[in-house]
Amino acid sequence: MSTGPLVKAKIQSIEGKKIEVTCLFNPKEYQLQRSNNWGSAENSTKNAFDLTFSGSSGAKLSMQLFFDTYLQGRAPGSSEAQDVRVYTDPLWQLMNIDDTLRDPKTQKGRPPRVLFTWGKNWLFNAVITSMQQQYTMFTPSGMPVRAMVTVEFQESAEHRTLMADGTSARSEAIRDVAASVAGDLRKRFR
């Protein structure tokens, strides 16, 4: 087990408007799910069906993120804790339609693709498909200071990433995003 510094999990847009969310607390657990699709054809001479592979779905990642500003500290110049929505609203922005990300055929915008990172070795290229936020603690004035956010991601093979010089590069390979965020991992494990 590593004794290095704690690395915070992050969720960031990899296209469109630049949005980055650093988790106040890392997830205590997460769930990965993936499925293969099999079709069956009836066969009157056997007790079991003949199965035919018909495709695979990308992985799904789900987790709960805990946000707490009550214990974290007070807002500058205030005796009250900071509103927790300062930290959770950017997550909701990652679900909003970005008009700069238009489909060439329909000219309709869409939400951005995102990258979930936790340290330099854990990257998940995806879109956010679902989010639910529950406020669990409030100040006497009614301001939320604690929230639990459940986020579900769907893996995305295609992405557009912004390079350091501001140009856009398109790739089908997650290793390109991984290299831009974490460097060349092959060199680290030789």
Image (cartoon, helix red, strand yellow):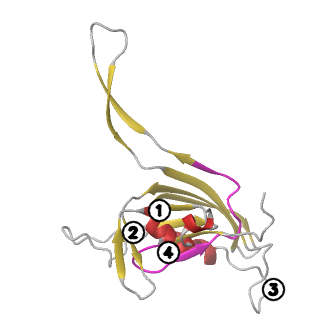
The type of residue carrying mark 4 is Ser
Query: Would you name the residue on which mark 4 appears?
Result: 180
Label 4 neighbour load within 10 Å: few <14, some 14-19, many 20+: few
**Of discs 1 and 2, which sits in the foreground?**
1
Of the numbered discs 4 and 3, the one sitting upstream in the chain is: 3
Query: Would you name the residue on which mark 1 appears?
Result: 125
The type of residue carrying mark 1 is Asn
- Place of residue 11 in the rendered image (x, y in percent of width and height, measured from the top left): 55, 69
Q: Residue furthest top?
A: 45
Q: Which mark is residue 111?
A: 2
Q: Look at 78% across and 69% down and name the residue there.
A: 4
Which residues fall within the magenta stretch? 13-31
- Label 3 element class: loop
**Of discs 3 and 2, which sits in the foreground?**
2
Q: Marks 1 and 2, Cα distance to the nearest angstrom?
A: 14 Å
Q: Quadrant of residue 126?
A: bottom left
- Place of residue 185 in the rendered image (x, y in percent of width and height, measured from the top left): 56, 66
Q: Look at 35% across and 68% down and name the residue there.
A: 171
Q: Look at 44% across and 68% down and name the residue there.
A: 176
- Place of residue 65 in the rendered image (x, y in percent of width and height, measured from the top left): 64, 61
- Dominant SS type (magenta): loop
Of the numbered discs 1 and 2, the one sitting upstream in the chain is: 2
Give above or below for 30 relative to 41. Answer: below
Of the numbered discs 1 and 4, the one sitting upstream in the chain is: 1
Left/right placement of residue 75 relative to residue 49 reads: right
Of the numbered discs 1 and 3, the one sitting upstream in the chain is: 3
Q: Which mark is residue 79?
A: 3
- Label 4 element class: helix
